[in-house]
Image (cartoon, grey):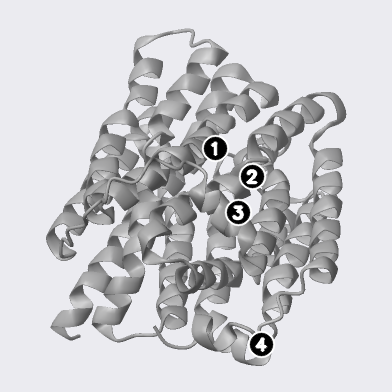
């Protein structure tokens, strides 16, 4: 490994470590809420707290990144996250009865700074890829593969920590992961000073740029419709299946880990898949397979079937992550990269709160199976409709976007 590659390796390692801690929390938080409240609706409302900060980051976090620099924004965001995520386990440890509104606020506080840190690290990737003399498509494939590897290891680690130390204590791992992430970026990634020219704050600049680009507009709109189904599946429906239908909290960790392994294989294969498949086949095909898998998970009767559906859902969906990040990197001017990445995440996750609340309410009244079957059918229909409406034809920008930096 050359000296010029070390900053990129450090950044990717920090990203994976941060996601590892988040995946531990993704197992612990819904289990904690369901154990205390026994209500899918309350669990869905609490999960909204993880999504609202993503939307807020589009208006504040992205502008801060472009104004003050991605390096400092990444370190500061992770340092603040390391402190804020402690509020949830400390409150549950001190109070016997935690009301639902307070649960929502605590989850929101724990996730408040993370989206800005994620967008800041994504903004740093192109310059570090140029320093390492590596194509963006290959770098993003590696990044997504390591992130999916964290998706695999994090839930297993979470289940193990919950079994050994309890649900509350498992949440402290997330705080440690944020602190280590901040330290790695501070040490391994060189600081690049940025100068803000004092232009008026434009909170919608990132969103306007996305909707002005046909490819990014398609990824944002279809991704938002996909999040309406995917966020409830991961944040609510799998926890409900694990804790209430099968009475086995470990099933949640197993499903998330299997999905992570499957998505990791897809992400690592992206650089080769794009040479034999169209971008539309990769992106929409991943959503289509995920829709089929989610629908089947409401139909199967055994735990092994749920695990199989999780594996099927991630198989091609994982390749969509490096595809999206590569196109955003290649098509976005460096001066507004922070706002574009934050806005892309906000647009894609904007439908998530509604999906979580509706899924929680419908699960209480109609059961998890009906919600999963409807959600799977909706996601499959979205993929097929998007494939027809926005085919993502690559001839105009594929060489620039997917070739070399």
- Image coordinates of residue 184 in percent, x first then y, are 19, 57
Left or right, residue 272 beside residue 278: left
Q: The residue tagged with tag 3: helix, strand or loop?
A: helix
Q: Earlier in the sequence, mark 4 or mark 1?
A: 1
Within-10-Å neighbours for mark 2: few <14, some 14–19, many 20+: many
Q: Are marks 4 and 1 in contact (CB under 8 Å)?
A: no
Provide the residue designation for mark 3.
Answer: 255
Q: Earlier in the sequence, mark 1 or mark 3?
A: 1
Provide the residue designation for mark 4.
Answer: 395
Residue 195 badge: none
Residue drawn at 83 percent across, 41 percent down: 369
Task: Name the foreground residue: 156 vs 378.
Answer: 378
- Image coordinates of residue 26 in percent, x first then y, are 49, 42
Residue drawn at 84 percent across, 24 percent down: 365
Image quadrant occupied by the N terminus: bottom left
Above or below, 393 against 221 in this view is below
Q: Earlier in the sequence, mark 4 or mark 3?
A: 3
Image quadrant occupied by the C terminus: bottom left
* Spatial separation of the CA atoms under disc 4 and disc 3: 38 Å
From the image, state whether disc 1 or disc 2 is nearer to you: 1
- Image coordinates of residue 235 in percent, x first then y, are 60, 40
Q: Are marks 1 and 3 in contact (CB under 8 Å)?
A: no
Q: Are marks 1 and 2 in contact (CB under 8 Å)?
A: yes
Task: Name the foreground residue: 383 vs 255.
Answer: 383
């Amino acid at each position: 490994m050359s000296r010029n590659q070390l900053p990129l390796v450090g950044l990717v390692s920090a990203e994976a470590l941060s996601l590892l801690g988040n995946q531990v929390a993704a197992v612990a938080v819904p289990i904690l809420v369901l154990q205390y409240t026994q209500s899918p609706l309350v669990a869905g409302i609490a999960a909204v707290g993880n999504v609202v900060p993503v939307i807020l980051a589009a208006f504040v976090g992205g502008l801060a990144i472009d104004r003050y620099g991605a390096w400092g924004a990444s370190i500061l965001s992770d340092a603040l996250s390391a402190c804020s995520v402690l509020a949830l386990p400390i409150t549950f440890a001190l109070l016997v009865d935690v009301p639902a509104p307070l649960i929502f606020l605590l989850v929101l506080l724990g996730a408040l700074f993370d989206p800005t840190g994620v967008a800041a690290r994504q903004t740093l990737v192109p310059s570090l890829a140029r320093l390492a003399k590596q194509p963006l498509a290959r770098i993003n494939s590696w990044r997504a593969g390591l992130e999916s590897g964290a998706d695999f290891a994090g839930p297993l680690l979470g289940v193990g920590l919950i079994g050994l130390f309890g649900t509350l204590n498992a949440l402290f791992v997330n705080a440690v992961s944020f602190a280590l992430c901040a330290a790695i970026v501070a040490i391994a990634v060189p600081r690049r000073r940025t100068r803000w020219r004092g232009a008026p704050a434009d909170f919608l600049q990132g969103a306007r740029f996305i909707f002005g680009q046909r490819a990014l507009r398609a990824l944002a709109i279809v991704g938002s419709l996909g999040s309406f189904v995917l966020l409830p599946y991961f944040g609510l429906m799998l926890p409900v299946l694990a804790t209430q239908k099968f009475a086995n909290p470990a099933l949640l960790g197993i499903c998330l880990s299997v999905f992570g392994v499957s998505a990791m294989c897809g992400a690592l294969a992206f650089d080769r898949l794009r040479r034999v498949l169209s971008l539309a086949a990769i992106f929409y095909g991943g959503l289509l397979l995920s829709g089929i898998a989610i629908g089947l998970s409401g139909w199967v009767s055994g735990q092994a079937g749920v695990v199989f559906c999780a594996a099927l859902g991630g198989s091609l969906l994982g390749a969509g992550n490096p595809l999206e990040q590569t196109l955003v990197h290649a098509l976005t001017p460096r001066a507004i990269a922070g706002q574009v990445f934050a806005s892309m995440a906000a647009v894609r996750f904007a439908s998530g709160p509604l999906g979580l609340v509706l899924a929680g309410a419908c699960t209480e009244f109609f059961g998890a199976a009906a919600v999963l079957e409807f959600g799977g059918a909706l996601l499959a229909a979205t993929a097929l409709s998007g494939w027809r409406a926005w085919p993502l034809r690559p001839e105009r920008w594929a060489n620039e976007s997917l070739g070399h930096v």
